[in-house]
């Protein structure tokens, strides 16, 4: 029997519209047309209820869809492209018209679905990312130059002036004609100036971008230990997975201050005969342990915080580190600091291992 497409229906956000197939050569749809359907018929009138149908949307359906005696079909949310709707039918005796009827269907893409729009969007995003990276690099270089200028100014001006004050006070207090009270005042002024010089040197080291790495931090810590523990036997051992791994200024600063406070406690309060310093830095974690065999103390009974425990814990908190301070009277003190380094990686993959030993016990 002859087969005909009798009605085309399209549903969109504006409602439903009905199209007569004879009035169009092609069904044109856009992204707003969410659903469309067809009604068809086999022109065999002997027993129409027994007519059978099969249809497919070529370009979408992989095979023919057996519709049985049903004379309608629908498609929803088709991707943009070109298709052809085909339908064939049989009469009540099961004789099929394999030629059937057909109608081309074109689903036009929305602007944002076109290849040129996507290509333009990719180009814009790539440009924005490139600009953001370039801006960030420029800002980083600018900050590094600023840090370097500040470090140079502090070193050349303030540090030199303070050193000059210390030298002058030292020369004056050596004169025999100075009163003892004045001599004591001059000594105190010299000590303050020297302490400020040491503080300025620390600040210069913090802000100098050339020291933003583990290796420079270890060198600085060794220098501090050599100065503060003069006359006290100590061992300083380090194990670094990658000495060039970057360390932000905040971590370097707080790490050094906690280390210095630990050594100051050894010198001021512990009366120790030996100090063990271990620094282990792997790619994801840094651990510092400072242990002495001195007098020790009861951390829970400290009220005046002369050991600077609150400051050490505050500095550890600023870098999201954990710190444990263990001590008992007569059994020495142990400071154990652990820092998570996963946030500090700068992408460098050099993984050279090194073990460094030092101290003043002949353990080199």
Image (cartoon, helix red, strand yellow):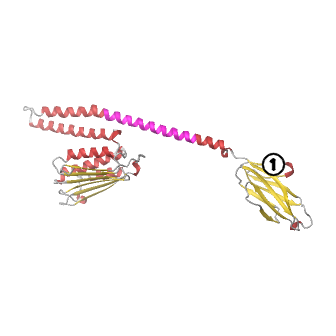
- The magenta region covers 124-152
**Front residue of this view, candidates 82 and 138:** 82
Query: Which residue appears at 25% of the width and 47% of the height?
Result: 260
In the image, residue 158 above or below residue 103:
above
Q: Is residue 105 visible?
A: yes
Q: In the image shown, does 63 or 123 lie closer to the viewer?
A: 63
Q: Which residue is mark 1?
A: 26
Q: Can see residue 20?
A: no
| Residue 93 position by quadrant | bottom right
Q: Neighbour class for label 1 at 10 Å: few (<14), some, many (≥20)?
A: few
Q: Is residue 127 magenta?
A: yes
Q: Quadrant of residue 334?
A: bottom left
In this view, 97 is above or below 108 = below
Dominant SS in magenta? helix
215 on left or right of 140 = left
Image position, residue 211 (x, y; %): 33, 41
Outermost residue toward the right in this view: 46
* Rendered position, 313 above or below 172: below
166 is within the stretch colored magenta: no
Instruction: Give the x, y percent position of residue 56.
Output: 77, 58
In-front residue for pair 355/112:
355
- Along the line of sight, the residue nearer the viewer: 157 or 221: 221
- x and y, in percent, of residue 13 in the image: 73, 51
């Amino acid at each position: 029997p002859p087969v005909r497409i009798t009605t085309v229906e399209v549903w969109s956000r504006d409602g439903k519209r009905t199209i007569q197939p004879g009035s169009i050569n092609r069904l044109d749809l856009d992204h707003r047309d969410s659903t469309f359907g067809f009604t068809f018929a086999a022109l065999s009138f002997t027993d129409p209820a027994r007519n059978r149908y099969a249809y497919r949307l070529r370009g979408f359906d992989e095979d023919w869809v057996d519709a049985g005696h049903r004379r309608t079909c629908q498609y929803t949310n088709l991707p943009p492209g070109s298709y052809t709707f085909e339908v064939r039918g049989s009469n009540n005796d099961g004789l099929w018209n394999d030629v059937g009827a057909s109608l081309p269907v074109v689903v036009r893409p929305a602007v944002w679905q076109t290849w040129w729009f996507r290509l333009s969007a990719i180009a814009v995003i790539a440009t924005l990312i490139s600009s953001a990276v370039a801006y960030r690099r420029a800002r980083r270089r600018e900050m590094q130059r600023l840090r370097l200028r500040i470090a140079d100014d502090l070193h050349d001006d303030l540090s030199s002036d303070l050193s000059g004050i210390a030298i002058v006070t030292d020369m004056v207090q050596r004169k025999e004609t100075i009163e003892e009270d004045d001599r004591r005042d001059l000594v105190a002024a010299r000590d303050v100036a020297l302490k400020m010089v040491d503080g300025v040197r620390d600040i210069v080291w913090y802000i100098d971008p050339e020291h933003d790495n583990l290796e420079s931090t270890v060198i600085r810590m060794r220098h501090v230990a050599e100065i503060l523990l003069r006359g006290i036997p100590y061992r300083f051992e380090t194990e670094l997975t990658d000495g060039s791994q970057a360390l932000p200024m905040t971590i370097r600063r707080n790490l050094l201050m906690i280390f210095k406070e630990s050594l100051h406690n050894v010198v001021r309060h512990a009366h120790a005969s030996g100090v063990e310093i271990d620094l282990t830095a792997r790619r994801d974690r840094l651990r510092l342990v400072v242990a002495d065999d001195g007098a020790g103390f009861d951390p829970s009974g400290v009220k005046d915080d002369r050991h600077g425990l609150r400051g050490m814990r505050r500095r550890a908190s600023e870098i999201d580190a954990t710190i444990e301070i263990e001590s008992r009277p007569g059994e020495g003190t142990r400071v154990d600091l652990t820092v998570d380094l996963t946030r500090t990686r700068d992408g460098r993959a050099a993984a050279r291992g090194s073990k460094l030993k030092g101290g003043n016990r002949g353990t080199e």
